[in-house]
Every structure is written in structure tokens, then in C-alpha cells.
Amino acid sequence: MNPIVLIPARMASTRLPDKPLALIAGKPMIVHVWQRAVDAGVGEVVVACDGEAIAEAITKAGGRAVLTDPDLPSGSDRIWQALGKVDGGKKHDVIINVQGDMPTLDPDVIRQVLSLLSDKEVDIATLAAPISDEHEKIDPAVVKPVIALSPDGVRGRALYFSRQPVPYGEGTLYHHIGLYAYRRAALEKFVSLPPSLLEKREKLEQLRALEAGMRIGIAVVATVPPGVDTPETLNKARQWHEQAVN
């Protein structure tokens, strides 16, 4: 495999304006995310951004950024457009989509999602962690995957995703982590498809892939990497970095 890591980032955020440039330990958040992806050591890392300010921050840090259309409807569309700009020769056969708001992401998590594509039957790979907080089980903001797990319980195949607490009955529920690895052909197919019925009902674009018959592999990790989308979660990320340094 010849992976490339693409990090979609855009300035528009209603809850945290100019989120990618929010400072954490003196550096813009998007630079922290880029550095984590570089530390994973799986391949080239490019930030797909919607404006010069983000591109300038990444370039100043020594990274590479590419501008994409600010009106694109999703991160998947953003990374597909970026891929066409940075890899017209189609040398990369795997695209890893790392969210631009995970400044404390463990680089090993990126390696774990990539490892799922060693199974040639898997089109798209993603991650999940067991839910321990009872509130998360009923929180519609927490997406729950239904997973056909392997006997070792550390990886499996996604059967469905929902904002409801599924599957019903006793047993572990899982918190989906929005980090993906796509085979190039799978990403191309995915972005060419119209939004599906279940996708529009649940407001979850990964259901488009399942409805189209694509196989999504899932690795189970211990914890959910905290994202930053509010002033409160930004402060938590700043505290995390202070503790990591000290």
C-alpha cells in the first residue's frame, strides 16, 4: 500500500470561530493535528483547507497544504478534490482522512486504521471505542456502530451506524470515531454516489457506503480521541498539552 494522509480543515465553525487556527501551546490547532499525522509515519501528509490562513500556518510549520472549494458539502468531498490536486498521477492507492479537530490524536490510532486494509475485502476502514458513559448511550451526537466482531473482539465489520443506542439488549455499545482509511477506488465511488435514503434519515454519510454494498472494517480502540468544537473542549485540549509537556 502507498497511503497519503489528508486532513480536511475549514474556517467555518458556528460554535468555535476560526477553529483550525485556535492556539494550543502557542501553535495553531491544525498544526498539532498535522504533526500527529506526520508522527504516525504512514506516508505523505497534506492539509486540505478552504483558505489561505490555514495554508499559511501549515506551510510555516514545514508542511504542505492545498486549497479546496469552501462550498464543498463534506470532508469526504474536500479530500477527494485535494487528492486530485496533489496526486494527479494516482500513485497513492490509500487515502487516510484525519479530522482537523483532533489535536491530541495518538499517532498509533492512524496506524491501526490503516492496518484494517490488509484485508483485501475491506473497502473503507474506521474506528470505534467502547462506551462507558451512560449518557453517551442515548446522546444522538454520539454515533453508534453495529459491529460484527471477530472472535478476538478487536476488529470487525460494520453492519450499521445510528444515533440511537443500537444494538438492542445487553452488551457493549460502541462510540464511532470519525477517522477513515479508503481504498482509492472506494473513495472515488463514494463521492460519486448521491446521498442515500438511510444517510439522509440518520444524517450519517457512512450509511451511503453501506447501502451501496461497500464493506467497512472497524478496529476497536481503548478510548475516543477528544475532538475540539467548543471553547470548553479547546480548553481541555490546552490542559492536555500542558500536562503532556510537564
Image: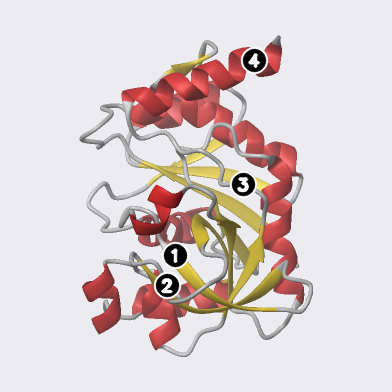
Residue 44 point in image, percent of width and height: 67, 47
Q: Nearer the viewer, residue 58 or 209?
A: 209
Residue corresponding to mark 3: 223
Left or right of 130 on screen, residue 228: left
Residue corresponding to mark 4: 243
- Indicate the quadrant where residue 200 lies: bottom left
Left or right of 185 on screen, residue 166: left
Q: Earlier in the sequence, mark 4 or mark 1?
A: 1
Above or below — where is 150 with respect to 130? below
Q: Residue at the spot x=51%, y=38% of the render?
A: 226
Assign a secondary structure to mark 4. Answer: helix
Q: Earlier in the sequence, mark 2 or mark 3?
A: 2
Q: Label 2 to label 1, Cα distance in Å?
A: 7 Å
Q: Label 1 to label 3, Cα distance in Å?
A: 14 Å
Left or right of 191 on screen, residue 17: left
Q: Are marks 2 and 3 in contact (CB under 8 Å)?
A: no
Left or right of 196 on screen, residue 152: right
Residue corresponding to mark 1: 144
Q: Residues within 10 Å of mark 4 (few under 14, many from 20)?
A: few
Q: Earlier in the sequence, mark 4 or mark 3?
A: 3
Amino acid type, residue under disc 2 in the picture: Val
